[in-house]
Amino acid sequence: MGMEMALELREGGGLDRQAAGLGDSAYQEMKERLIRGVYKPGYKMTVRAVAEDLGISSTPARDAINRLISDGALVYAGPKTVIVPVLNESDLKEITSIRIALEGLACELAAQHGTEQDFETLRKFQKEINVALDGKDYQRVLRHNKEFHFLIYRMAGLPHLVSMIEGLWLRVGPSLYNLYPEFAEEKYGVRNHEMAMEALAERDGAALRAAFESDIRDGYRSLRRAARENSLA
């Protein structure tokens, strides 16, 4: 093999790795946005829109969309139309049941591992949530709510468990925007988070699990009501 040919292959491999890296970065960013509820159920996801939104070319944008379809986070609504799925009541019930089991387990394990720095970070996230709620900035609420929950889940020290929980949030995340403004007005999440922080400070795994199960169930009731209204629309 000549030197020029070898150089071309090495350069081509570098380009392939670069494209793969961009595709992975786009996938991770889109996944994070879906989990945080940036894209609402029914939103039409096009390659052009994703590319422009993330400032990338169409190839990594298409790769990210295809991976999210494989994850079940996006679905085909037609031969060439990809959307954020609209969860029905049955979907929500199933996802909620699994969330209670997995997130509850993570909480019980996490209670024994939190540090003072973790507690301080949680208080910071909750302060940000409260400020955003007062300002009716629900996108910001959802961002910090996700950070609050996953900081606790990561304390469990089980990355595969956290990955499974993330997969559930990827499915339900877009629907979380339907929690507001009711969830903000009733302060359901704030009370549950306050109980969670108290339980964590006391290393009480059962109480921490109960606080998060309450948070999940409160959210489910609001999302179920929204799903029923959508089915009648």
Image (cartoon, grey):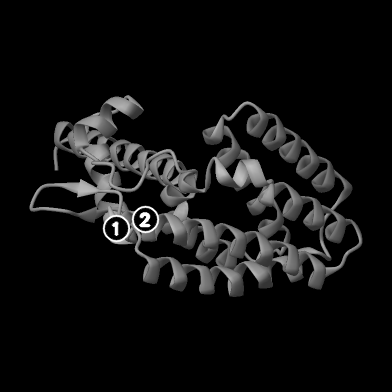
| Residue tagged 2 | 229
Task: Tell me what residue is drawn at x 29 percent, y 58 percent.
Answer: 232
Residue at the far right: name it: 202
Q: Is residue 193 visible?
A: yes
Q: Is residue 167 visible?
A: no
Amino acid type shown at disc 1? Leu
Q: Which mark is residue 166?
A: none
Work out whether 115 lies above or below 132.
Answer: below
Amino acid type shown at disc 2? Glu
Work out whether 104 lies above or below 64.
Answer: below
**Mark 1 and mark 2: span between their CA atoms?**
5 Å
| Residue tagged 1 | 232
Q: Is residue 125 left or right of residue 6?
A: right
Instruction: Label 1: state its secondary structure.
Output: helix
Q: Is residue 23 left or right of residue 148?
A: left
Instruction: Label 2: state its secondary structure.
Output: helix
Characterize the local packing of mark 1: few (<14), some (14-19) or many (20 or more) Cα atoms within 10 angstroms: few
Q: Position of residue 107 (x, y in %)?
A: 72, 66
